[in-house]
Image: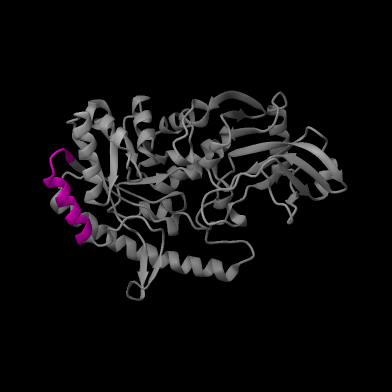
């Protein structure tokens, strides 16, 4: 029996009392992936990206381990909810236009002490102040400045990386730091720089050796350029804000590279805990799939084909086959190219289909990590061949932030 076949047998035994659709997290794999992230971080603390987990119980589990510290959230409403739930260090990774949230933040000392907001434009400060005036809040708002990490070539005519912050140069970031420092009610406490073109792009795509080599060359150049520029940005900002508390960088795919930079004080990571399918294509690390979902077989249309209920759970990003879940267990199943995964039913082809009966489970891996939790209200935590706990996802707690 292969290792994957053994996992399938375990998952089927563990969930035999549960009807599919169902989602699980294999805690042995989850903990092993956490260990691997810590090893690659080389002693620097890891801030957990909540959008890649979306389950309070699992956030608490990983943050209880030495080496993990703080949460990186994705909306202001989520940040406030987590802070009220006892999370004491929440960095909002994206700017917000949530005026009601800002009114709450500026009126509550506990929330203001726990939550740091992301800023890359003085107009975002204006939103906070407008909310402050409406709600009467006077608390100082903790601010993190985001650096654009894109690699710019040919005089800026070619850009590699996500369109995020407009702040690219040390001078631009330092100028915003001065503007914040001069403004009553705000305090610059950190810098964030997420190099998604390094951390979130696989460099070993199966069957595409030339593209993979091109990605590796691009990423090596991007790491060198960003390391120099990030260090310069930190020096420039520290000249304005000597008490800067943290410099956050990285992501699951770049942990060890970002951790090697002296200017970086903490690493962000989250997807590496679940290891969705998009993280199969990396040379820098390999993890164990920890989060899976199962759909039930509901039809047997013919030889070599079964149909499962639902399963059309595409991930965010540019549409393409790499955004689709993949049939994982039993091994050897594939989509019908004329149908693909559907909202209410999904045909699956391959010889393993002939061994599947009505009601059997087919296990899938999602393309991205936390987005799986937007489809399920609970995660069943598997240890060995038993479900030892069932915990709500954000959705299960009635929290759909985006």
> 63 or 76, which is in the foreground?
76
Q: Is residue 290 above or below residue 349?
A: above
Q: Is residue 340 visible?
A: yes
Q: Nearer the viewer, residue 268 or 285?
A: 268
Q: Residue 390: x, y in percent? A: 57, 24
User: Does residue 279 show up magenta in the picture?
Assistant: no
State which region is magenta.
171-186
Looking at this view, is 397 or 4 the one in front?
397
Residue 46 x, y percent position in the rendering = 38, 42
Relative to 194, residue 203 above or below = below
Q: Residue furthest bottom?
A: 154
- Asked if residue 124 lies left or right of residue 253, the reply is left
Residue appearing at x 16%, y 44% in the figure:
243
Left or right, 193 with reference to 113:
right
**321 relative to 34 in the view: left or right:** right
Q: Residue furthest front?
A: 134
Asked which colour scheme the image uses, the reply is one colour
Question: Is 221 situated above or below 377?
Answer: below
Q: Is residue 330 left or right of residue 90?
A: right
Q: What main secondary structure does the magenta stretch of the protein show?
A: helix
Q: At which x and y percent is residue 289?
A: 59, 43
- Residue 393 appearing in the image: no
Q: Residue at x 62, y 50 (%)?
A: 324
Name the residue rendered at 61%, 29% in the picture.
382
Examine the structure image and report whether residue 184 is included in the region drawn in magenta. yes
- The residue depicted at 63 percent of the width and 47 percent of the height is 325
């Amino acid at each position: 029996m292969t290792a994957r076949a053994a996992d399938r047998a375990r998952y089927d035994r563990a969930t035999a009392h549960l009807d599919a659709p169902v989602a699980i997290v294999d805690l042995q794999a989850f903990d092993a992936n956490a260990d691997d992230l810590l090893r690659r971080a080389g002693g620097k603390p890891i801030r957990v990206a909540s959008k890649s987990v979306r389950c309070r119980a699992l956030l608490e589990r990983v943050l209880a381990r030495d080496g993990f510290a703080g949460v990186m959230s994705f909306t202001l409403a989520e940040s406030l909810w987590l802070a009220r739930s006892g999370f004491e260090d929440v960095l909002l990774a994206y700017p917000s236009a949530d005026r009601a949230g800002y009114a709450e933040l500026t009126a509550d000392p506990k929330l203001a002490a726990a939550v740091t907001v992301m800023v890359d434009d003085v107009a975002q400060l204006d939103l906070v102040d407008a909310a402050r005036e409406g709600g009467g809040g006077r608390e100082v708002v903790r601010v993190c400045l985001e650096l654009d990490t894109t690699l710019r070539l040919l005089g800026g005519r070619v850009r590699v990386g996500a369109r995020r912050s407009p702040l690219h140069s040390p001078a631009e970031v330092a100028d915003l730091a001065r503007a914040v420092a001069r403004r009553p009610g705000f305090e610059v406490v950190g810098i964030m720089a997420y190099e998604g073109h390094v951390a979130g792009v696989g460099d070993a795509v199966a069957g595409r050796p030339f593209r993979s080599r091109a990605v590796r060359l691009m990423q090596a150049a991007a790491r060198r350029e960003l390391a120099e520029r990030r260090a310069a940005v930190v020096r420039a900002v520290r000249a304005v804000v000597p008490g800067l508390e943290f410099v956050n960088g990285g992501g699951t795919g770049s942990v060890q590279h970002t951790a090697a930079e002296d200017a970086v004080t903490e690493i962000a990571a989250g997807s590496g805990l679940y290891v969705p399918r998009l993280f199969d294509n990396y040379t820098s690390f390999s993890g164990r799939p920890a989060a899976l979902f199962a759909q039930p077989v509901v039809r047997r249309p013919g030889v070599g084909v079964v149909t499962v209920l639902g399963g059309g759970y595409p991930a965010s990003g540019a549409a393409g086959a790499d955004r689709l879940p993949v049939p994982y267990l039993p091994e050897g199943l594939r989509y019908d190219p004329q149908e693909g995964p559907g909202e209410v039913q999904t045909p699956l082809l391959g010889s393993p289909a002939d061994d599947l009966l009505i009601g059997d489970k087919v296990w899938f891996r999602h393309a991205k990590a936390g987005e799986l939790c937007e489809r399920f209200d609970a995660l069943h935590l598997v240890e060995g061949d038993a479900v030892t706990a069932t915990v709500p996802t954000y959705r299960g707690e009635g929290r759909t932030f985006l």
